[in-house]
Image: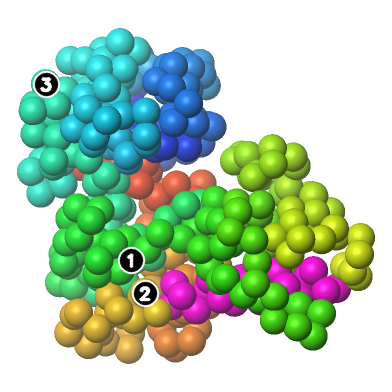
C-alpha cells in the first residue's frame, strides 16, 4: 500500500528547497536545488521537474511557500506571486496544492493569487511557527546564503513585530546579510590590510562566501551558488576574488594576509548580525536566561556564537524534527512547511 506523503516547496530567488514527510510527521527527504529565478521562469520549471525526479514517493499534499516573487524579472511582487503559483500549477496537481499564508491559514492557488499580500515572503513565519510548537520562549535565528531572519518566540507564539519585508527590514527581523551571496562592499567600505587602511572597490568582485570559505567555516564543495566570477569556491579562487577588491592580485601578498582579511570581514558581518539580534530583543520583554537561541541555516555557526556570548542555551532547528536532521537545519522553512502541513492539513 502506497503511503500518502506531504511534499513542501520553498521557492526562492536563487534556490528551490524541497522536503517530504509522512502523515505521521517523519521527515524523509530535505534537499536544495539551484534555481536562479532572476534568469527566467523556465529556471523554476526545470528545478521543479528535477525535484519531482528526485522525490521517492508521490505527494498527497503539496505545501508551498515562496520568496522568489522579489526577483527582478517580475514588475512587482503581486505579479511574482501569480507567476510562481501559475508555474507550480502546471507542474503539480493544483487540487493538491496548499499555499502557506501564516495566520491566515492555507490557501488554494486561486485564493493565494487574489490574497497575495498574505503569501509573499512568508517562509520565515513557518520556521518560527513550527519552532514555537516546541519552544516556549527563545530567539529563532535563520542565517542563509542571502538573508537572516531573527524572530522572538514567547508563550509558544511567534512574536514578530512586522510581516512585510519592508517593515521587517526596518526593525531588523529581516537582516539582509548571508554567508554566501552578500557583497563584501555592503559589509565595509574600508579595510585594514598591509598596515594600511584601504578603501575597497565598489564592485561585486567578492562576496561573504569567499571569506567564510577561506576561513574554513564553509565547505567549498557544498556551495551550490555561483561565485561572483563564476569560478570555483576553492581557497585560491576566493583569494583571487578578494584581492580584486583591493586592486591587486592574490599572489602579491602571503596567504596569511588574505586569511587575516577574510577573518576581519567575517567578524564585521558577525557583529552586524549580533547588533540586529540585539535590536530585535530590545523590542520584547526580557527573556529568561534559560530561553534558548534556535539556530538554522547554513550560517548557523554565527547564531551559536551569539548564544555563547549571551550565555544562552543553543538548539539547532533540526533537533526539533523527527528524525533529527542537519538538512532540516540547513533548510528550516521548507522542513517547517512540510511539518506544519502534516499537523494542519493531513
Tell me the magenta residue range.
256-274
At 17% across and 15% down in the image, what residue appears?
A: 95
Q: Which residue is labeled 3 in the image?
A: 110
Residue 102 picture location, percent across and down: 16, 46
In the rendered image, the quadrant that contains the C terminus is top left
Secondary structure type for disc 2: helix
Among numbered discs 1 and 3, the one appearing first in the sequence: 3
Q: Which residue is labeled 1 in the image?
A: 150
Confirm whether residue 156 shows in the render. Answer: no
Secondary structure type for disc 1: strand
At 75% across and 42% down in the image, what residue appears?
A: 232
Among numbered discs 2 and 1, the one appearing first in the sequence: 1
Residue 251 picture location, percent across and down: 91, 60
Magenta span contains residue 271: yes
Which labelled disc corresponds to residue 167? none
At 20% across and 60% down in the image, what residue appears?
A: 167
Q: CA distance from mark 2 to mark 1?
A: 8 Å
Tell me whether circle 1 and circle 3 mark residues in contact (CB < 8 Å): no
Q: Is residue 342 left or right of residue 327?
A: left
Q: CA distance from mark 2 to mark 3?
A: 37 Å
| Image-quadrant location for residue 243 | bottom right
Magenta span contains residue 147: no
Q: Is residue 91 left or right of residue 206?
A: left
- The secondary structure making up most of the magenta span is helix
Q: Which of the pair 144/153 is nearer the observer?
A: 144
Q: Which residue is labeled 2 in the image?
A: 276
Among numbered discs 2 and 3, the one appearing first in the sequence: 3
Q: Which of the pair 76/299 is nearer the observer?
A: 76
Amino acid at each position: 500500500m502506497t503511503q500518502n506523503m506531504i511534499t513542501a516547496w520553498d521557492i526562492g530567488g536563487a534556490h528551490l528547497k524541497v522536503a517530504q514527510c509522512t502523515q505521521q510527521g517523519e521527515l524523509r527527504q530535505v534537499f536544495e536545488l539551484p534555481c536562479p529565478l532572476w534568469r527566467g521562469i523556465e529556471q523554476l520549471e526545470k528545478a521543479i521537474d528535477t525535484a519531482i525526479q528526485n522525490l521517492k514517493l508521490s505527494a498527497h499534499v503539496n505545501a508551498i511557500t515562496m520568496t522568489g516573487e522579489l526577483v527582478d524579472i517580475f514588475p512587482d511582487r503581486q505579479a511574482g506571486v501569480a507567476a510562481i503559483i501559475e508555474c507550480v500549477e502546471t507542474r503539480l496537481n493544483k487540487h493538491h496544492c496548499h499555499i502557506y499564508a501564516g495566520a491566515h491559514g492555507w490557501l488554494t492557488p486561486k485564493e493565494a493569487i487574489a490574497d497575495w499580500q498574505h503569501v509573499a515572503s512568508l517562509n520565515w513565519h513557518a520556521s518560527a511557527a513550527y519552532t514555537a510548537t516546541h519552544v516556549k520562549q527563545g530567539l529563532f535565528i535563520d542565517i542563509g546564503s542571502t538573508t537572516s531572519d531573527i524572530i522572538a518566540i514567547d508563550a509558544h507564539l511567534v512574536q514578530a513585530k512586522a510581516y512585510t519585508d519592508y517593515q521587517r527590514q526596518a526593525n531588523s527581523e529581516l537582516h539582509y546579510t548571508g554567508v554566501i551571496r552578500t557583497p563584501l562592499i555592503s559589509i565595509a567600505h574600508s579595510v585594514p590590510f598591509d598596515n594600511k587602511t584601504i578603501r575597497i572597490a565598489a564592485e561585486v568582485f567578492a562576496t561573504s562566501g569567499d571569506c567564510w570559505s577561506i576561513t574554513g567555516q564553509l565547505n567549498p564543495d557544498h556551495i551550490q551558488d555561483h561565485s561572483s566570477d563564476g569560478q570555483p569556491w576553492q581557497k585560491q579562487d576566493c583569494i583571487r576574488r578578494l584581492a580584486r577588491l583591493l586592486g591587486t592580485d592574490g599572489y602579491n601578498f602571503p596567504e596569511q594576509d588574505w586569511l587575516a582579511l577574510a577573518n576581519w570581514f567575517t567578524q564585521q558581518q558577525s557583529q552586524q548580525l549580533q547588533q540586529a539580534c540585539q535590536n530585535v530583543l530590545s523590542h520584547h520583554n526580557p527573556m529568561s536566561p534559560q530561553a534558548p537561541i534556535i539556530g538554522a541555516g547554513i550560517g548557523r555557526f554565527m547564531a551559536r556564537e551569539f548564544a555563547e556570548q549571551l550565555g544562552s542555551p543553543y538548539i539547532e532547528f533540526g533537533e526539533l524534527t523527527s528524525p533529527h536532521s542537519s538538512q532540516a537545519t540547513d533548510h528550516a522553512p521548507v522542513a517547517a512547511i512540510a511539518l506544519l502541513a502534516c499537523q494542519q492539513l493531513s
